[in-house]
Amino acid sequence: MTHLNLTYDRIKSGLQIKPALLPLVLMSMRGITLVVKFAFTLFIAKYVGLNELGIYGLVSAAGIVSPAIFGLGIMHLLSRSAVKQPLGETKSDLIRYFNYLSIFYFVAAICIMTYFAINGNWVMAALILLVIFLEHINGECYQLMINLSRPLLADILHFTRSASWVLIYMALAGVFIPMRNIHALLIAWIVGSGLCTLIYMLVISRLPSSTTANQRSLWNWLGFRSKQSSWLYLNGIATTGANYSDRYIIGAFLTLELTGVYLFFWQIQSALSNLIYTGLIQIARPAFVKNFTQINPDWKIVKNLMRSTTIVAVIFSILALIVMAIALPFFKIPLVSQYFNLFVLILIAFIFNVLAEVQVLVFYSKHKDHQVSLITLAVFVLNLLGCLCTIPFWGLWGAASTAIFSALIRLSLLSHFIAGYKAGDLKGAES
């Protein structure tokens, strides 16, 4: 047995856990990640600078925006198919997809390095591009592992790339002042994400190989899959745009400092969202897919998940407000304290958004990609127009109010279509 096989077996043997304990373990890990991210946001704001916090937030957003734009929705398609199809077919598709990504980012690197070598800071550009590339792979492999019913592995690696390197960097930067800069931060980020990428590649390499030879060339395969995933692609772009366009508009109309303030509060709600998504929503995805492929699906699964998500989201919001009200005076960041009431609006948007994510599972499971894509696109347009109209006049308050409005519209539209699906299924069952 090779050293690679031994390494894989050690990883696999260490990821066995009782199913009843899984949600608790996942939420605990994500809870620790939440605390670490919050501490990191404070660390950057206090010791590195609000400008650097704004840059960090924009790079984080770019790491999420990039898969939505350049991934063509293919990994969403492959992950959904992986729930039921032979793993050999999934592995074959993954190899081709990663080949495409490698070629794309290689060409992008050449173009970007050429431009910044002449007109700007090429070192910063190279570091940012590498972070985006690694975050692209890690984010999409995370979703794949969830659909392959390996949530513990996925969340251990998520903890590694979201919290472990952060703890190491903060410890080093706390001792060595020269490390308190955006370049050192990005290098630490690359190390953490790079380690996770290697582990994902190891796990995927151990999937069984397909016994059927694929005769399609890479570009024919890419055209075929991108056509299949076109609605998923549109939905991904619209969702990402709706979630992240506001901070870019804030950066354009206001200042990097105010962008940093907005990201300070938004990072907290993002961590809360991830915690709920990890412990409640994502682990229900395979069950939703299997349930809604049946002739007579059980709709109680949606009601139960909505109820649990609502209760947890409200509790988390109340706790977050209390903790921030107590903690902010000790942080001594006047501009952030000045905007504390903004946090209330952001948390309201958070509650609406996590409930919408539960409903999106229904569309995903029933293969209603075109409908959820059109809904998300409409919400994205409303959010974009709202931000452009409100941020220049009301600043961060306009951005937060627009976020609430967009989330409420999204939740209402999804609920309307789901009511129609449920009525149709119940009518079919009766007949």
Image (tube, rainbow, N blue to C red):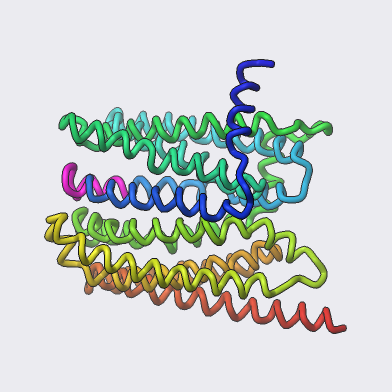
Magenta span covers which residues?
Answer: 44-57
Q: Residue at x 55, y 61 (%)?
A: 280
285 with respect to 180 (left or right): right
Q: Quadrant of the C terminus?
A: bottom right
Q: Residue furthest right?
A: 431
Q: Residue at x 37, y 52 (%)?
A: 34
Residue 170 drawn at (x, y percent)? 26, 37
Residue 288 drawn at (x, y percent)? 68, 62
196 with respect to 396 (left or right): right
Q: Residue at x 49, y 73 (%)?
A: 310
Say above or below: 373 vs 421: above
Which secondary structure dominates the residues rendered in magenta? helix
**Foreground: 123 or 296?**
296
Q: Is residue 231 visible?
A: no
Q: Quadrant of the N terminus?
A: top right
Residue 68 drawn at (x, y percent)? 51, 51
Q: Is residue 410 visible?
A: yes
389 with respect to 314 (left or right): left
Q: Residue furthest top?
A: 2
359 with respect to 191 (left or right): right
Say above or below: 194 vs 295: above
Answer whether residue 199 is magenta in the image: no
Quarter location, residue 121: top left
Quarter location, residue 314: bottom left
Say above or below: 56 vs 260: above
Q: Residue at x 61, y 20 (%)?
A: 4
For the image, the number of numbered tags is: 0
Residue 116 drawn at (x, y percent)? 31, 32
